[in-house]
Image (cartoon, coloured by chain):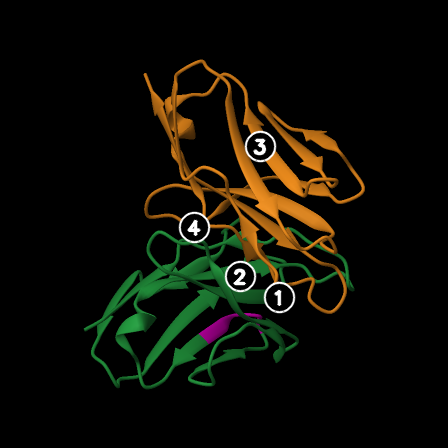
Chain colours: A orange, B green
Amino acid sequence: GESVGLHLPTLSVQEGDNSIINCAYSNSASDYFIWYKQESGKGPQFIIDIRSNMDKRQGQRVTVLLNKTVKHLSLQIAATQPGDSAVYFCAENKEGTSYGKLTFGQGTILTVHP
Amino acid sequence: DAGVTQSPTHLIKTRGQQVTLRCSPKSGHDTVSWYQQALGQGPQFIFQYYEEEERQRGNFPDRFSGHQFPNYSSELNVNALLLGDSALYLCASSLLGGAVYNEQFFGPGTRLTVL
């Protein structure tokens, strides 16, 4: 069945370092991939998304890379700050009849040490 | 501009009871999706409502039902509660644009505990 998973459940970095969070997906028919940040006691917050016909997309301090050959997605956070500490989820979406459904991975806990 | 709001924040129920959770979408949004997030897991899609109808559904039993009102707000109802229903219930709103992906904005969730 469809699944979106993560390689590493936890990631600890020092403030100022760059962080890379990885995600593997199995549904090659997905059209969009999305990264969400979830802080304790809050709902997921949209970070960045990428359409399946793209390889890279950049935002403010974040870059998402998509490798369709190996079904791999990554989120790069530049100059990581303590406020970036949270759980990060990748999610996928398929346009058409199921486009409203997001399928989430298990999540990676990012801890940034000052 | 208010974002997605949910009520109540926390709720404690006992097995066999019924519960109703409420969601108001972000201003201008017409589509509401509900997710269940168990502790330490990613959110799992329950169902989505558009134009007051259930548009699609995830792998959840019929004990889970919903409703959308003309003002686009929505309710999630769970009957015959089980201990395993304890979770954070998230509501997400979006603007339906045909069969095109639109960003979903999440509310803070309702923490349901079933004893």
Circle 4 chain: A
Residue that label 2 marks: B25
Check disc 4 and give the amino acid type. Answer: Gly
Residue that label 1 marks: B31
**Which quarter shows the N terminus of chain A?**
bottom right
Judge depth for marks 3 and 2 and give the one in front: 3
Compared with A69, B20 (above or below) is: below
The Cα–Cα distance between marks 4 and 3, rounded to whole angstroms, is: 19 Å
Which residue: 49% across, 79% down?
Answer: B66
Residue that label 3 marks: A75
The Cα–Cα distance between marks 3 and 2, rounded to whole angstroms, is: 28 Å
Q: Position of residue B31 (x, y in %)?
A: 62, 66
Secondary structure category for the residue under label 3: strand
Circle 2 chain: B
Q: Residue A94 lies in what quarter of the image?
A: bottom right
Residue that label 4 marks: A43
The Cα–Cα distance between marks 1 and 3, rounded to whole angstroms, is: 28 Å
**Which quarter shows the C terminus of chain A?**
top left
Which residue: 73% across, 69% down?
Answer: A97
Compared with B46, A88 (above or below) is: above
